Every structure is written in structure tokens, then in C-alpha cells.
Amino acid sequence: MKKVERINVMMRYINNRAHFTLSEIMREFNISRSTAIRDIREIESMGMPLVSEAGRDGGYFVMHNSVLPQVRFTDHEVKALFIAFMATRNQQLPYLRSRQSIAEKLLSLISETQQDDLILLNQLLLFEGTNPHNPDLLDLSDLPHPMVESLFQMLLLDRYLLLTIQEEEEIQSYPIYLLHLHHEKSFWIIEGFDLKEEKKRTFPADQLIDVKPFSPKKRLGEKEILEKVNTGKERVNVVLELGPEAIAQYKKYHLLRVSLAYTNPYQTTAILKTYVNVHNPEELAEFTNWLLFLGRDIKVRELPEEVVQEIHKRLDHYSM
């Protein structure tokens, strides 16, 4: 019996009893104790109100011998869920196998007509990263880096982490307070506050070889960390006004450190403020490339001379 089918049968078995024990579940479904515990926890997470009883003869009972009200999805909600699944394929997202089981459960709940609609949508809609020759809704080809899911599990327990990173030919460890996880171009970027150097740093998740909780003798509180992060922010040296065409380009791709402030309710104009380290050749080149990508629908309020010179070099090169 497959896990999804076993869970469904187990839910009916449990709901028809005022009381049950782990031993009864193990015998009834021919599973180990650890599997029985995992299944019961999953059933609890799905909304069945189970109450455990301590003691030698303890077990479980269902509160009021009933489950929570059944969740029903409208036709549009089902389509929204599946289109979201389709749009996020090949994005190196964690919990991919869980996403597959959710899709299987939803498929089992909807009518044949709705299934036919989803099959048609799956054939017609192509998103970035979709293989048109194999647009399989449950494709498992976009598994993320194996450490990404471990990172997600760990950060839910504690944001104070010890990262072990493979840097070229050497391995380094960094104690951090995790600020954010960024997803860009199908890669995950870890943004954290380095507790040793007391500054903000970023790490590519695909270079992560180990992650574990970090328990320093004296922890900096979140408020103190954020104050240090804000104090260490560089002065803004780029201020741009973006029109609708530039905003459209921004939505296609933007640098992690750059954000917009819209200046009208229709989101057709915006102000962009950021800092560019003009003494870092790689950062200067990356920002110049992105600025040219935004196009001509830009008004410059403030821009370092080094960026202006770099733009002129590129334009002169293209005109040759």
C-alpha cells in the first residue's frame, strides 16, 4: 500500500474509533513503530485533532470523535494551485517530493472534467525553464542542491547557524545569524550576519557542505544584529527614476540588493535607490550591464562618474 493511500485509510480507521494505540496501528497496517509515529504526526498536521494520553496503557483519541471540516477547493482555486506548480518547475525549490504528493492528492479529489482541464493547461502553458517536449506536471528533474532542504529544516529550528562552505580549494566555517534566503536564476543565496566579523555576508547555497545550529556563549539579539546591519549600510550613490518600460525590465531581472519604491498607485513610475561599490570591478561591471538592460526609460538623479564612464565605454564598443 502506497503512503498516500495508507494515510487516507488510516484517517478513516482512526476517526471511527474513540481510542487507539500505536500497537493497534502497527498491527492493522503492518508497519514499524517509527513509521506509525510519522504517519500519526502527518495526520495531525493535516488537521485531525488527536489528543495523546500518557502512561503505560496510553494512546490517542480523536477530540469529539470527528475531524475538522473538510477543505474544498473551487474550480478556479484548483487551477491556480496547478498553474503555480507549473510556473515553479525547474526553479531548484526545496520540498519537491512533497509538492508531487500534494499534486497527486489534489488530482484524486477533483472530477475527470477538471483533470482534463489541467491536462490541457499543462500542454498549452509554457513557463521559463519548462521543457516543451516533456512538460510533465510532476517532473522531478529540478531537484535543488541536496543541502538546501537541510538548510530550510535547520532555519525553522534556529536562525543562528554554523555554515561550512567550500571556497575554491579550501573549506571555511562561518557562524551567522540568517537574515534572508534569496532565490535568483534557479540558485539560492544565503544572506546572513557574520557573528564573528559582525558584518553582513552572502554565500551561494550550492557551496554549502554542512549546516548545523550555532550556540555562541553570548548571543547577539535580533534587535542588536539588525541595528549593526543598518549601521553598516553603505551610503546611497545611485538614484534613478524608472518609467513603465524600465519597470517591466526590472521585473524580468533585478539585482538582489536593489528594490523599487513606486511613486503612483498604478505602479508605472518608481524610484530606485542603491549603492554601487565602484572600486570593485566585478560589481561595477555587473551593475553597468544591468543598467543597460533596463533600457532608455530612465531618468538619472544621481550616478557615480565611474558608472557613467563604464556605460560610455560599452556604447562606444557597440558602435564600432
Image: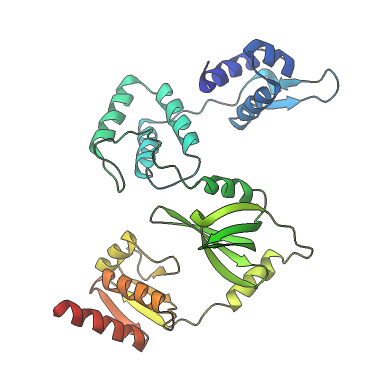
> Which residue is at a point 63% across and 68% down the rendered structure image?
194
- Residue at 48% x, 35% y is 97
Viewer-closest of 242 and 35? 35
Residue most toward the bottom? 305
Query: Quick check: 177 above or below 48?
Result: below
Residue 99 % position (x, y): 46, 36
Work out whether residue 134 or residue 236 is closer to the camera in this orientation and state it: 134
**Residue 258 visible somewhere in the drawing:** yes
Q: Quadrant of residue 100?
A: top left
Residue that lies at the very extreme toward the left in this rendered image: 320
Percent of width and height locating residue 150: 58, 46
Query: In this view, which residue lies farthest toward the top?
Result: 28
In-image side of 7 versus 216 (left or right): left
Give the quarter of the image for residue 11: top right
State the image coordinates of residue 66 (x, y, percent, origin top left). 64, 20
Question: Seen from this angle, which residue lies furthest right?
Answer: 56
Q: Quick one: quadrant of the C terminus?
A: bottom left
